[in-house]
Image (cartoon, rainbow, N blue to C red):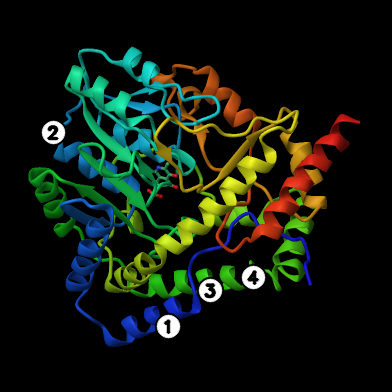
């Protein structure tokens, strides 16, 4: 029986991994040894010399800015379309985020815009492999080298993607990743730095060793949320549980998933506090090790679904579909289309059982959090106005991608009539 009800995301967390969580918590293993094992596993997967586990990508970015010796008054080029916490961390360290535009359909840093943003104070650039799509790294690295700028890859949405056969995260000076419940792999909460640079690794490791552990029970709560979401987004349960809740929420003017997984945008005055800064625990590492065993299957399913949507939607009038930089091998963290009436399109798709989202990225070049760094960028502005994220998660199969493509075609016809 096919219900044609498709959630916007489904966590990669499984009951087997919940069991790993419970066992790890019961055995009270040495946190540092377990985390070191996950770091080795992850470094080997990326092909990097060093990996240092961190509690969040934003803290990882903060540590990398320190490790690379950026100081107050220096500049870092950041794509205008990104997660607010990244420019916020630079600003908290006294470093000026200089926003550069992204490609309208690639959604990632435009290399010409990066070069145009360089000044004598530029010390680093952050190519953000947004929505699972690697940036044009040949061009970005060539420009960075010419101007003596360090390259920090943001792989928060791109763990496992490749560029010309090389894993994202192994293309610049250092990188960070994040593994929240909505990401392609999860450690419940947690993140990672990778680098081939001994000095950067040493500095980040020393900084992490100086942080204190958060409560172990936090992971148990996160595991319970992961399991609940896993069941609530199960193809047989979703139509009768979360889907009606989302439809009802929308009627009442709210979005329960956005409220649960979204984050209030605040500007940091210093390094983030609480769990975003706490040292990772064995329980997170144990889940991470299990997830790395499955990452190729999880990403492979995303790639299959993303390619099916690419193909099915390429010639649909009225929407823009993604384009990928030459050499990019995306993992399709999101499948983003543009439509000038996206709220109406979202409602029309929901009627057909397809749950979508506007996503969590902001146009940081024109954001009230950063008035003194304001530098409006046209493509980022259009994307945040028009983007709609279609489901592409690994729980979907061929019937789902066909259903989504047909729903998009019907919805667009309905809006045009
Ligand atoms: C592109 C990007 N960069 C950075 C982050 C920040 O990650 P964290 O919440 O681990 O700090 C996110 C979070 O989703 C992200 O999507």
Counting from the top left corner in percent of width and height, residue 201 is at: 13, 49
Mark 2 Cβ inside 8 Å of ligand 1: no
Question: Which residue lies under the disc numbered 3?
Answer: 227
> Mark 4 vs mark 1: which is more N-terminal?
1
Question: Which residue is drawn at the image coordinates 51% and 34% (left, top)?
Answer: 362
Decide if residue 116 is on the left or right side of residue 339.
left
Question: Which residue is drawn at the image coordinates 38% and 67% (left, top)?
Answer: 291
> Mark 2 vs mark 1: which is more N-terminal?
1
> Mark 3 vs mark 2: which is more N-terminal?
2
Question: Which residue lies under the disc numbered 4?
Answer: 234
Mark 1 nearby-residue class (10 Å; few <14, some 14–19, many ≥20): few
In the rendered image, the quadrant that contains the N terminus is bottom right
Front residue (pair 138, 36): 138
Q: Is mark 4 on a helix, strand or loop?
A: loop
> Mark 3 vs mark 1: which is more N-terminal?
1
Question: Which residue lies under the disc numbered 2?
Answer: 69
User: CB atoms at circles 3 and 1 under 8 Å apart?
Assistant: no
Mark 4 nearby-residue class (10 Å; few <14, some 14–19, many ≥20): some
Residue 19, numbered circle:
1
Front residue (pair 334, 93): 334
Is 267 placed above or below 43 here? Answer: above
Mark 1 Cβ inside 8 Å of ligand 1: no
Give the distance between the C-alpha atoms of the residues marked 3 and 1, in whole angstroms. Answer: 11 Å
User: CB atoms at circles 3 and 2 under 8 Å apart?
Assistant: no
Give the distance between the C-alpha atoms of the residues marked 4 and 1, in whole angstroms. Answer: 19 Å
Give the distance between the C-alpha atoms of the residues marked 3 and 2, in whole angstroms. Answer: 41 Å
Specify the quadrant of the image occupied by residue 55.
bottom left
Marks 3, 2: nearer the viewer: 3
Q: What element carries label 3?
A: helix
> Mark 4 vs mark 3: which is more N-terminal?
3
């Amino acid at each position: 029986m096919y219900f044609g009800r498709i959630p916007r995301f489904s966590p990669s967390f499984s009951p087997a991994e919940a069991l790993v969580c419970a066992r790890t918590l019961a055995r009270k293993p040495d946190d540092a040894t377990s985390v070191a094992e996950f770091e080795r596993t992850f470094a080997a997967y990326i092909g990097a010399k060093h990996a240092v586990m961190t509690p969040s990508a934003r803290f990882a970015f903060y540590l990398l800015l320190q490790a690379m010796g950026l100081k107050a008054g220096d500049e870092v080029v950041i794509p205008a379309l990104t997660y607010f916490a990244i420019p916020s961390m630079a600003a908290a360290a006294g470093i000026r985020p200089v926003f550069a535009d992204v490609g309208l359909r690639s959604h990632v840093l435009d290399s010409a815009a990066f070069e145009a943003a360089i000044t004598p104070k530029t010390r680093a650039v952050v190519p953000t492999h947004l929505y699972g799509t690697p940036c044009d790294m040949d061009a970005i690295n060539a420009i960075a080298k010419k101007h003596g700028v360090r390259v920090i890859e943001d792989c928060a949405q791109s763990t496992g993607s490749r560029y010309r056969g090389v894993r994202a995260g192994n293309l610049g000076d250092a990188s960070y990743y994040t593994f929240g419940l909505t990401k392609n792999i999860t450690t419940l909460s947690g993140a990672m730095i990778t680098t081939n640079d001994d000095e950067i690794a040493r500095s980040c490791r020393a900084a992490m060793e100086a942080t204190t552990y958060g409560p172990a029970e936090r992971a148990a709560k996160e595991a319970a949320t992961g399991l609940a979401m896993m069941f609530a987004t199960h193809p047989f349960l979703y139509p009768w549980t979360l889907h009606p809740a989302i439809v009802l929420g929308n009627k009442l003017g709210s979005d329960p998933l956005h409220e649960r997984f979204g984050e209030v945008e605040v500007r940091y005055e210093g390094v983030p506090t609480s769990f975003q800064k706490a040292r990772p625990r064995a329980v997170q590492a144990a889940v991470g090790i299990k997830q790395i065993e499955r990452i190729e299957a999880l990403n492979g399913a995303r790639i299959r679904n993303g390619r099916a949507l690419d193909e099915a939607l390429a010639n649909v009038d009225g929407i823009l579909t993604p384009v990928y930089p030459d050499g990019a091998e995306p993992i399709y963290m999101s499948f983003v289309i543009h439509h000038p009436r996206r709220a109406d399109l979202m409602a029309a798709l929901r009627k057909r059982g397809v749950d979508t989202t506007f996503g969590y990225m902001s146009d940081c070049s024109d954001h009230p959090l950063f008035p003194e760094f304001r530098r409006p960028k046209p493509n980022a502005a259009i994307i945040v106005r028009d983007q709609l994220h279609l489901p592409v998660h690994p729980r979907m199969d061929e019937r789902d991608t066909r259903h989504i493509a047909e729903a998009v075609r019907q919805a667009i016809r309905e809006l045009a009539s």
